[in-house]
Image: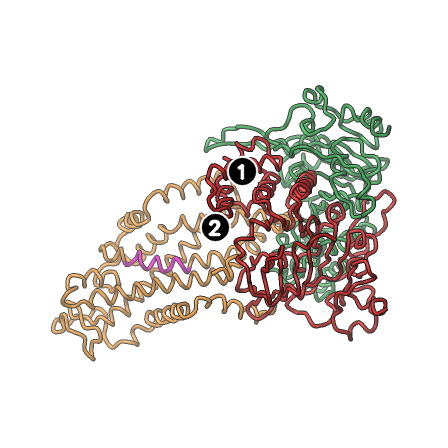
């Protein structure tokens, strides 16, 4: 099979769910564009208050209307996407890297250090993740950095466990054994063989996790624990808007719908990625 | 065995502790290998044969220190491999290599054949230019019967036989003296098996390699090995020249094993005698007392359940681990 | 020749994958007589298992599809022109039983052996009570040589060893009094001493129930010991067929000859070099209309590459069939 064929096969399996997988990818692209180009896409600033526009109904100037403080909802949605993207991507990257590192250590050494790491994982898993993240969030304070730290810490156990399992099975594989017999350096075995072979699986979890993290970040903001006002986040927008749910339903529904679609899109993309990467699942759907 | 053996295994034991719970309370011991001794001369092949769970693969792994042994000695050029410090062991490691059973699992799916061999080749730390490396890898590819272009392929682009050849080339890249072949052909199709066996024999002739050939297929072992150990539940029950395996088996287990294997020769198959064994191999966790084979042995007597027999070396070239093999073979020859 | 039990004519099965079509079975005809042990021999990927699965109509569709074929079992038409005729549920598991290589996957891991017996038996015998089915199951287990059958009925599959599980599957066939047992690599996962036990058991059952057995295997020794007739398959076609004696002592097709030379023999005076078949089996997705064995054939003539794929024809008069151009002239006579 040539490289071209491989890409073709990857594409066919990735999009094997039909229209829904195309929609998911389209929506993720839309989300990224919104987040990155927010200042260009809208003439307003997210935090500019204009009390004359308080609770304005949708119009040509303000497509989805304005909130209590007269801030444009579309603008705040675009900037909210920014926050969601930054927070989820960074916390997932930090969580994944730390999780992979710890999982690698635990799986590869299999000594007292490994026991320590894995028992810690057990302990953290016994605490509901939401509670855990809230506690850490409160401890480190209300800021984007604090939130990222809390979220990445919260997802650590799942990455450690996954990596641990992968390393344990890869370590036993004959090709790793053969390298050890040949005196190939351990660092080389890890960098050139363990990590690349663990990477696809980690990538799938990473994608799936992005959606969940956006959800968790919004939940925290909704509860007022996450990022503080007046920064626009979808969660806090829902929290602000739901008081006017009968008069101005768009205030709560618009961010809620965005949230739903983005999380769904990431989950579908993650599933498709798994089908395309994991040959055992290929064609079984 | 006249010459100095290159590998000499003495009373090798591999016991695994069975533990339970967080406190790792010991609840039993699995004697996977329990006192195995044999030796091989340079350039020869010793076959280790037995059914699953007999400890043949574990024996191979213990020699390579892939599993830690609980006792015994493994001499390589009169140095005890098991007693070596890690640094010392690293020095001789590359001299003993392994060929694996599963040609699919033994190659990194993300590496080309060329880089699989190259990585192992350069791990000896010698300085080489990249032309020298390319030349050496290509020589290895040709040596195992592949073309140089094959080096660019990835494992999933190769057939089972070709993958096994890459596995052999990788072992050769270490310039080994001894190769442990762990069921190297049992995952391959019949028509491919012969290609690999012939290749192994050719390499042995050309490079003076010593093989420890672990397999369950008696016919294959007889073909390739000079000397054979039959294992049952962690013990060697009989050792002999491979030519004698089918003509002069002495231990009742060997006899049963040989008769259980159907032979391809149609007329021979219709006429030869069969011994059927009752029951299955016991788990090494509950090893029977006395002779481990006695519950299945058609000739077992009271003594067999009480005492474990020791190797009878009346014929030093054909030791047998059975109390009654002499009587037995008198009966059958009459 | 005995009574014809299973007759399969011109079976063609393909798998339609993205971008390629795998021709797994290419026009295969074979038959099984009552009271006969027939072996289908070939290397992995030669279509031997797919042939049997197609007869049982167990091919996953899509991607698989039976393109053509007429199959008759004991007077019942199962397939005509590739289309199912009879209700397979009346035949499958009941009159034709199947035994697979890995017995663990053929038993449901979460149910007791006994309950699985009850389900199978009651599915095929309307009106049988649970108690009757259980008793019948215990009797069948006893018949296949499982000690403490009543106790074993209460075990879960994972509590039994590989050999025991294979016996349980045979016991299903016994309890249903199957006329035909299709055993797909029944002993490949077992140790040799256990393999001998399981095979002897199958032969006993066959004798007792007057049934027939199809063994699908790559193990030529097994075939030599147990089979009456052999079909040799290569790349989705039968290349040679005949009695075991004909095939094993006087093989005609270069592939059969090659196979027999490639396996190490255990006879005392033979330690000659093995003669492997060079190359590897062709991909079933890339076949042309020439002889599929051509690239590996050691005996090919100059004219072979220009000829169409040879058809299976009788060589001599005693039922020995071979598909090879080497015998074109002899067959013409």
Chain letter for the green colouring in the rendering: B
Residue B190 shows in this picture: yes
- Magenta stretch holds residue A215: yes
Name the side, left or right, on which A15 lies relative to B172.
left
* Quadrant in which the C terminus of chain C is drawn: bottom right
Task: Give the main secondary structure of the magenta stretch.
Answer: helix
Task: Give the label, 2 or 1, closer to the camera.
Answer: 1
Q: Chain of mark 2?
A: A
Name which residue lies at 44% across and 54% down. A97
The colour of chain A is orange
Give SS at disc 2. helix
Q: Are marks 2 and 1 in contact (CB under 8 Å)?
A: no
Task: Where is residue B61? Give x, y as percent.
Answer: 66, 41
Q: CA separation, marks 2 and 1?
A: 50 Å
Which label sits on residue C136?
1
The colour of chain C is red
For label 2, the residue is A163
Give the image's coloring scheme: by chain
- Magenta stretch holds residue A118: no
Instruction: Specify the quadrant of the image occupied by residue C191.
Output: top right
Q: Which residues are magenta?
A: A207-218
Which label sits on residue A13?
none
């Amino acid at each position: 099979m040539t490289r071209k064929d491989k890409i073709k096969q990857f594409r066919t399996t990735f999009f094997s769910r039909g229209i829904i997988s195309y929609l998911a990818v389209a929506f993720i692209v839309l989300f990224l564009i919104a987040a990155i180009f927010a200042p260009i896409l809208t003439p307003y600033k997210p935090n500019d208050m204009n009390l004359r526009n308080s609770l304005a109904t949708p119009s040509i100037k303000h497509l989805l209307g304005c909130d209590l403080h007269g801030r444009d909802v579309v603008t705040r949605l675009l900037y909210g996407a920014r926050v969601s993207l930054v927070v989820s991507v960074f916390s997932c990257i930090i969580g994944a890297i730390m999780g992979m590192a710890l999982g690698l250590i635990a799986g590869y050494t299999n000594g007292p250090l490994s026991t320590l790491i894995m028992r810690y994982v057990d302990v953290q898993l016994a605490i509901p993740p939401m509670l855990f993240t809230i506690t850490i969030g409160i401890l480190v304070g209300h800021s984007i950095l604090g939130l990222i730290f809390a979220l990445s810490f919260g997802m650590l156990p799942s990455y450690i466990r996954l990596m641990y399992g992968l390393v344990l099975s890869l370590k036993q594989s004959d090709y790793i054994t053969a390298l050890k017999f040949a005196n190939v350096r351990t660092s080389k075995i890890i960098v050139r063989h363990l990590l690349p072979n663990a990477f696809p699986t980690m990538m799938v979890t990473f994608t799936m996790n992005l959606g969940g993290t956006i959800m968790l970040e919004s939940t925290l903001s909704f509860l007022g624990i996450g990022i503080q006002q007046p920064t626009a986040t979808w969660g806090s927008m829902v929290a602000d808007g739901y008081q006017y749910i009968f008069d101005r339903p768009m205030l709560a529904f618009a961010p809620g719908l965005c949230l739903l679609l983005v999380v769904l899109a990431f989950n579908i993309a993650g599933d498709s990625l798994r089908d395309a990467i994991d040959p055992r699942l290929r064609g079984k759907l | 065995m006249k010459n100095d053996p290159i590998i000499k295994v003495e009373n090798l034991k591999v016991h695994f502790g069975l533990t339970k719970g967080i406190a790792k309370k010991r609840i039993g011991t699995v004697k996977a290998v329990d006192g195995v001794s044999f030796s091989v001369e340079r350039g020869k092949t010793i076959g280790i044969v037995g059914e699953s769970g007999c400890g043949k693969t574990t024996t191979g792994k213990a020699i390579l220190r892939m599993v830690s042994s609980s006792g015994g000695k493994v001499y390589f050029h009169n140095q005890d491999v098991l007693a070596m410090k890690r640094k010392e062991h690293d020095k001789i490691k590359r001299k003993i290599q392994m060929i694996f059973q599963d040609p699919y699992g033994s190659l990194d799916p993300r590496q080309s054949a060329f880089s699989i061999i190259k990585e192992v080749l350069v791990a000896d730390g010698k300085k080489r230019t990249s032309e020298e490396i390319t030349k050496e890898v290509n020589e290895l590819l040709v040596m195992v019967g592949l073309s140089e272009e094959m080096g660019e392929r990835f494992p999933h682009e190769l057939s089972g036989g070709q993958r096994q050849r890459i596995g052999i080339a990788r072992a050769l890249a270490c310039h080994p003296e001894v190769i442990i072949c762990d069921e190297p052909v049992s995952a391959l199709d019949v028509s491919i098996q012969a290609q690999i066996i012939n290749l192994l024999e050719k390499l042995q002739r050309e490079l003076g390699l010593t093989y420890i050939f672990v397999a369950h297929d008696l016919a294959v072992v007889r073909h390739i090995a000079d000397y054979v150990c039959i294992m049952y539940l962690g013990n060697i029950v009989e050792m002999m020249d491979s030519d004698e395996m089918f003509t002069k088996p002495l231990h009742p287990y060997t006899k049963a094993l040989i008769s259980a294997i159907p032979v391809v020769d149609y007329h021979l198959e219709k006429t030869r005698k069969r011994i059927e064994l009752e029951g299955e191999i016991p788990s090494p966790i509950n090893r029977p007392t006395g002779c481990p084979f006695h519950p299945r042995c058609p000739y077992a007597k009271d003594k067999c359940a009480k005492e474990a027999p020791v190797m009878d070396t009346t014929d030093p070239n054909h030791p047998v681990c059975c109390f009654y093999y002499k009587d037995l073979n008198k009966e059958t020859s009459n | 020749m005995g009574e014809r039990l299973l007759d399969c004519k011109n079976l063609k099965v393909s798998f339609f994958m993205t971008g390629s079509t795998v021709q797994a079975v290419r026009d295969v005809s074979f038959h099984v007589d009552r009271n006969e042990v027939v072996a289908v021999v070939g290397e992995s990927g030669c279509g031997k298992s797919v042939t049997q699965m197609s007869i049982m109509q167990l091919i996953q569709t899509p991607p698989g599809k039976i393109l053509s074929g007429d199959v008759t079992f004991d007077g019942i038409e199962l397939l005509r022109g590739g289309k199912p005729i009879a209700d397979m549920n009346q035949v499958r598991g009941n009159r034709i039983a199947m035994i697979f290589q890995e017995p663990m996957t053929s038993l449901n891991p979460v149910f007791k052996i006994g309950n699985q017996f009850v389900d199978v038996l009651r599915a095929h015998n309307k009106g049988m009570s649970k108690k009757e089915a259980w008793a019948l199951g215990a009797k069948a287990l006893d018949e296949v040589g499982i000690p403490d059958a009543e106790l074993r009925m209460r075990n879960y599959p994972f509590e039994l060893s590989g050999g025991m599980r294979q016996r349980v599957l045979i016991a299903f066939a016994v309890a249903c009094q199957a006329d035909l047992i299709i055993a797909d690599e029944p002993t490949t996962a077992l140790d040799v001493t256990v393999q001998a036990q399981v095979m002897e058991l199958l032969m006993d059952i066959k004798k007792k129930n007057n049934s027939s057995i199809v063994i699908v295997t790559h193990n030529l020794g097994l075939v030599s010991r147990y089979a009456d007739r052999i079909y040799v398959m290569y790349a989705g076609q039968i290349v040679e067929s005949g009695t075991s004696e004909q095939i094993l002592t006087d093989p005609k097709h270069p592939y059969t000859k090659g196979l027999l030379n490639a396996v190490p023999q255990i006879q005392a005076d033979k330690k000659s070099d093995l003669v492997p078949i060079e190359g590897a089996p062709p991909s079933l997705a890339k076949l042309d209309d020439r002889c599929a064995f051509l690239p590996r054939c050691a005996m090919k003539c100059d004219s072979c590459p220009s000829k169409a794929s040879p058809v299976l024809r009788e060589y001599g008069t005693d039922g020995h069939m071979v598909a090879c151009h080497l015998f074109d002239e002899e067959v013409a006579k």
